Amino acid sequence: METPGLVVHGEVAHFSTALRSLVNNPLYSDIRFVVGQERQEVFAHRCLLACRCNFFQRLLGSEPGPGVPSPVVLSTVPAEAFLAVLEFLYTNSAKLHRHSVLEVLTAAVEYGLEELRELCLEFVVKVLDVELVCEALQVAVTFGLGPLQERCVAFIEAHSQETLRTRGFLELSAPALLPLLRSDKLCVDEAELVLAARSWARVGAAVLERPVAEVAAPVVRELRLALLAPAELSALEEQNRREPLIPVEQIVEAWKCHALRRGDVARGALCRRRRGTLPREHHRFLDPPFK
């Protein structure tokens, strides 16, 4: 009776190196892509992409006709990120960089490459810093990446003041900003948070060509105006007359907290102190400070 066969393995490194040499190599390629805003031409091999990724299997499903096939245009993915995706499909490994990992992550999510997505997520967490965290939070919110969103929010809670000064903060969408403004653990005073929200709304208003108050509407309710001292609230009210940002009734509710000075009104989340809230005389009427 013949004995069962034995599977033997050659050197993986040699195999991987050989396949890596085919990435963006016109030799034997039968498919061309034009990728990114720069419209860079990228060469690939139809059978390899189709067997490794369902997205490309659907995209390249029809047989190419006679003659030179037209290139496949993928304008939304940057060339560097697309080449990283190809490297992973060819070799099951990829070299990730801090400056482009979020673009690779976005492509991995859109192309359904779960293993590459997880590798990107691990890398993002390792390199997360003040300049990257808001961009990472935006990607996490956009694609429903809950664990990454939690890590980003926790990082911002610990580095609140530095993060509020970044360009990435000003470019957050309203859904990405909301979990930050709802957090009790932000290490920033409410007065500074109001200023940051105004700066954010101004940038959005300029980009979207809409009024500041309209841009701010989805998030401004999360500002805890009752934490401000009366003089600060008066100054805010005056500025709000010149440049509307906060609904008048929201400012009125904050004044009620000052006028009543008792617990009933001051029990809501919008009167609760954050980790970075600076003490003020009227705070003794509010809930205990954050611990």
Image: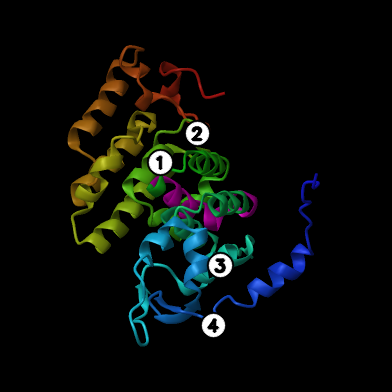
Q: CA distance from mark 3 to mark 4?
A: 20 Å
Q: CA distance from mark 1 to mark 4?
A: 63 Å
Q: Residues within 10 Å of mark 4 (few under 14, many from 20)?
A: few
Q: Earlier in the sequence, mark 2 or mark 4?
A: 4
Q: Earlier in the sequence, mark 2 or mark 1?
A: 1
- Main secondary structure along the magenta-highlighted residues: helix
What is the residue that sits farthest to the bottom in this orientation? 67
Q: CA distance from mark 2 to mark 4?
A: 66 Å
The residue at which mark 4 appears reads as 28
Pinpoint residue 30: horizontal percent, then vertical percent: 46, 79
Q: Residue at x 54, y 39 (%)?
A: 154
Relative depth, front residue between 135 and 259: 135
Q: Quadrant of residue 84?
A: bottom right
Q: Residues within 10 Å of mark 2 (few under 14, many from 20)?
A: some
Q: Earlier in the sequence, mark 1 or mark 4?
A: 4
- Regarding mark 1 in the picture, which secondary structure is present there? helix
The residue at which mark 1 appears reads as 191
Picture disc at residue 278: 2
- Regarding mark 2 in the picture, which secondary structure is present there? loop
